[in-house]
Image (spheres, rainbow, N blue to C red):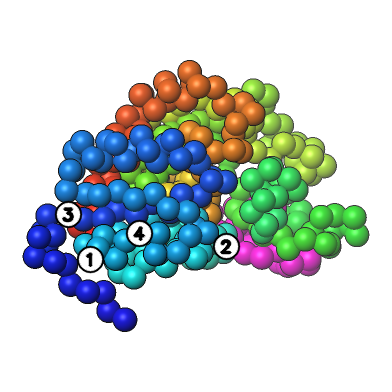
Amino acid sequence: MAPPPPSRTDRGKTLNLVFVHQPSKLSSADIDAISARISRIAPEIKVFGVLPSQDAQIISAHDWLRPTLTVSFGSVRRFIPPRGPVYENRFVSKLEQFRRFRAIGIETPHTEPFRHGMALDPEQWGPFVIMKPSDPDLTSNGRYLQVFRTASLSERSLPAAHPSRHLLMLLQQWIDSGENLTSYRCLTLFGAVLLGSISRSPSQRPSLDASDAVIEAMTAESDRGHNKKCDDPEIMAFASRMAEAFPRHPILGCDIIREAGTGRLYAIEVNAGGNVWHFSSPRTAPWRTHDNTEKLKRHFSSFDVAAEVLVKKTRAEAR
């Protein structure tokens, strides 16, 4: 059923912004803080906070007369709004991400499903490849990542005990980020960067002239325990471009590598499921401190930017 038209008193005056709060992903206090900022800069926007376990009747029929935009950092589940666009975070496979990046011209390493015995052309793959699980939970925990020399893995069958024998694995061109492996992560909200960090391994990787055995035993990612803030304009602009490949996803954790020597940036992947709001996510609670979080929010004006982005989005798209 089509939504009723706005009443004469509401038309052009008041808009709804509905947050579907995901308790497993962020604190309601963050939504309240951003909502307060929205109310100050855009008093015509009425903000509602609901849960995905609730249905649309939690908001009154009168309030539903107004144009509405709904935003959720995960699936809205039971909450199905009767009007207006809905933006929600959902899983996107790494292969689909690769296709989306390539489709809009964003540099990203070549990626394919791994098959034992597959032939690997160095012209396509480069001198090294990295194998990783297709399961995002395993990748996010850094499990089963392994670097190979391309020529060594080509047409090779790995031992029966190798993880690839019982897990679906992906093969990706490996981008050398330097002697101390380095990566970048940006949190974006509708393309605007709210937070940036750099992770650099404190120990050097082996020489790329090392034996195959040494290469295959090396640590395959930067040390996540050594994150520092990063406000490099080039990195942040690249993350915003990455977000263009996922226009229906409100927030994204954009992972980026800068190639040593060339300085070229590569989109490695995004966390599209919404588990990236590390200002208050349960996942980062064990090592997050209040003081450091507040410093980061102030440095990036994170919640002010979030409020401005949501005001702009609501004004442009509430229906």
* Range shown magenta: 109-132
Under tag 1, what secondary structure? helix
Residue 272 appears in view? no
Task: Count residues near mark 1 (Cα–Cα under 10 Å), then give few for <14, some for 14-19, many for 20+.
Answer: many
- The disc labelled 2 sits on which kind of residue? Ser
User: Rounded to the nearest whole Å, what is the CA distance between mark 4 and mark 3?
Assistant: 15 Å
Of 64 and 72, nearer the camera is 64
Whichever of labels 3 and 1 marks the residue nearer the N terminus, that label is 3
Instruction: Determine whether, in the image, residue 44 is placed left or right of residue 194.
Output: left
User: Rounded to the nearest whole Å, what is the CA distance between mark 4 and mark 1?
Assistant: 11 Å
- The disc labelled 3 sits on which kind of residue? Thr
The residue that appears at 78% across and 67% down in the rendered structure is 117
Task: Count residues near mark 3 (Cα–Cα under 10 Å), then give few for <14, some for 14-19, many for 20+.
Answer: some
Judge whether residue 319 is colored magenta: no
**Residue located beneath label 4 in the image:** 59
Whichever of labels 3 and 2 marks the residue nearer the N terminus, that label is 3
- The disc labelled 4 sits on which kind of residue? Ile
Residue 12 on image: x %, y %: 10, 59
Residue 182 on image: x %, y %: 56, 33
**Residue located beneath label 2 in the image:** 93
**Residue located beneath label 3 in the image:** 14
Under tag 4, what secondary structure? loop
Whichever of labels 4 and 3 marks the residue nearer the N terminus, that label is 3
Residue 161's disc is: none
Q: Are marks 3 and 2 in contact (CB under 8 Å)?
A: no
